Amino acid sequence: MQTVFHTNNDRQPEMNSNRLFAQELLEKITENTNNLPPPIFTEKCCEFYKQLDRDGKLEFFNVLSKEFDVDRENALKKAKEYINAGRDKSDTTSQIEKSLQHILEPRYNVFLDRVHQLPNGLKFLADMRADLLDIMGPRGSTTYNKYCGLEQNIRLKLKKYVIGFLKLERITWEKSSASLLEKICLYEAVHQVKDWKDIKRRLGPDRRVYAFFENNTPNEPLVFVHVALLPTMANSVQAILNAPCPTEKDLDVSGFKYAICYSITTQHGLGGINLGNYLIKQALDDLQKKLPLLKVFATLSPMPGYRQWLKDHVDSDDTIRAEFDHVQDWKHVGIGFSFRKDQEELRDPLMRLCSRYILSEKQMGNNALDPVANFHLRNGACAHQIHWQADTSEKGIRDSFGIMINYNYITDRLEGNHRLYQKNGTISISEPASKTQETSWLSQWITKKQ
């Protein structure tokens, strides 16, 4: 099938024809009959969608959101019946209520359910939502507002489909298929996998990779996490990525005291469903059972918004600007930072401001401004330590001047921390009562004077 939507005026007839074709397929899929429509219609609709370009997908979403949304005229009519029945204390109130609930469900939900029943249907829906998110643009924009109802319904459906039907698997070099390993390499969103040698190292005997799968998509990792097993707390991602792989003969499992999550990737179309939270906690449970000598489960996490936040506020915030009074050319904080040239004079102010960024800077409401911080703190983790020169890659320097942070997952504090954070944005810190001379503790930096 080669049909695609087009937006050029000279091909308007073809665009209209394709729109009608999509509507016809969707009508057959969602028609209200006692017999389920043959899956061939749903399969054709999915094949049709996959061939569309961006403009074609936009038109497809127009069809879904306009022609297959809630029948509002009928809903208003039924709502009036419901109000009247309730006022009159009619025996038909319950029946009308059920009818109203049915009417208030968008017709396109039937399409979503039919797609999910197909092999790899969940993957299709996740990819379709990813396309929609890209088209919608920033929150509050006209396009966002137009499609947010459709996006929210797809997200809720995806959550319903996956939660309770997820299967945890450990990915290994020896047992996992080559196609699955290739997807792990391709999807990795935090620390790019360079080659097969690199992924083999990340699956070594002192490493773990866990992923969630769904029954209908057995070879499709929905979310996965990389874990390093170490004798001490991690303070450099390059040290993790570049460490030589131990042989089975040299491996000392009793030396593993720290399980460090250094990368977690969720498919774009499954964002906002909180799969990462479930995965981390199930991975923690599996590690505790199989490696009982582990004492600490923590992360080595990026701060993707730190440098941008500093650039946005260094000119307008006097307290930030004051941190750089001693720096001759402070504007290179935003554009020309390099460790070799700048580390001595910029290390202390950047670490102090980093502590402020993590502990004090908020989004609307009480959530931490940094998206990764918000994710882990919402899960119930504690902010632990920040590390200078922890990620010396180009991306690490561009995002956060190479600074990274540990979030500490303390099992018996997770639920309490989660409740406090959700209630009023309280951020819990895990630090020893008697601190060492290390200069990586958040509380030390945020109170340290210039």
Image: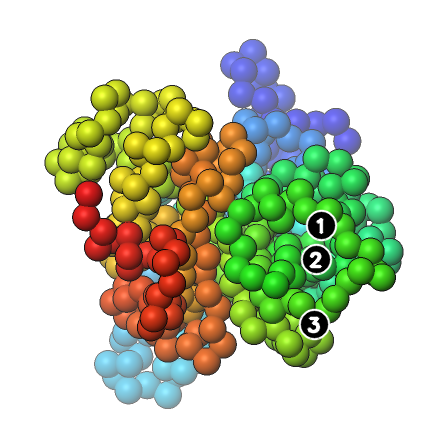
Determine the CA span between mark 1 and mark 2. 6 Å
Q: Which mark is residue 332?
A: none
Residue at mark 1? 202
Q: Name the N-terminal-most of marks 3 and 2.
A: 2
Residue at mark 2? 207
Q: Residue furthest left?
A: 318
Label 3 or label 2, whichever lies nearer to me, is 3
Q: Residue at x 33, y 26 (%)?
A: 334
Question: Considering the image in quadrants, where does the N terminus appear?
Answer: top right
Q: Please, what secondary structure does the residue beneath circle 1 have?
A: helix
Q: Residue furthest top?
A: 10
Q: Between 307 and 98, which is closer to the camera in this rendering? A: 307
Q: Residue at x 28, y 70 (%)?
A: 423
Determine the CA span between mark 3 and mark 1. 20 Å
Label 3 or label 1, whichever lies nearer to me, is 3
Q: Are marks 3 and 1 in contact (CB under 8 Å)?
A: no
Kind of residue at badge 1: Arg
Q: Between 419 and 231, which is closer to the camera in this rendering? A: 231
Answer few, some or many: residues within 10 Å of disc 2's Cα (few below 14, many 20 plus, some between 14 and 19): many
Q: Are marks 1 and 2 in contact (CB under 8 Å)?
A: yes
Residue at mark 3? 254
Q: Please, what secondary structure does the residue beneath circle 3 have?
A: helix
Q: Name the N-terminal-most of marks 3 and 1.
A: 1
Q: Quadrant of residue 92?
A: bottom left
| Residue 27, image x, y percentages | 62, 48
Q: Please, what secondary structure does the residue beneath circle 2 have?
A: strand
Answer few, some or many: residues within 10 Å of disc 3's Cα (few below 14, many 20 plus, some between 14 and 19): few
Q: Residue furthest front?
A: 437
Kind of residue at badge 2: Arg
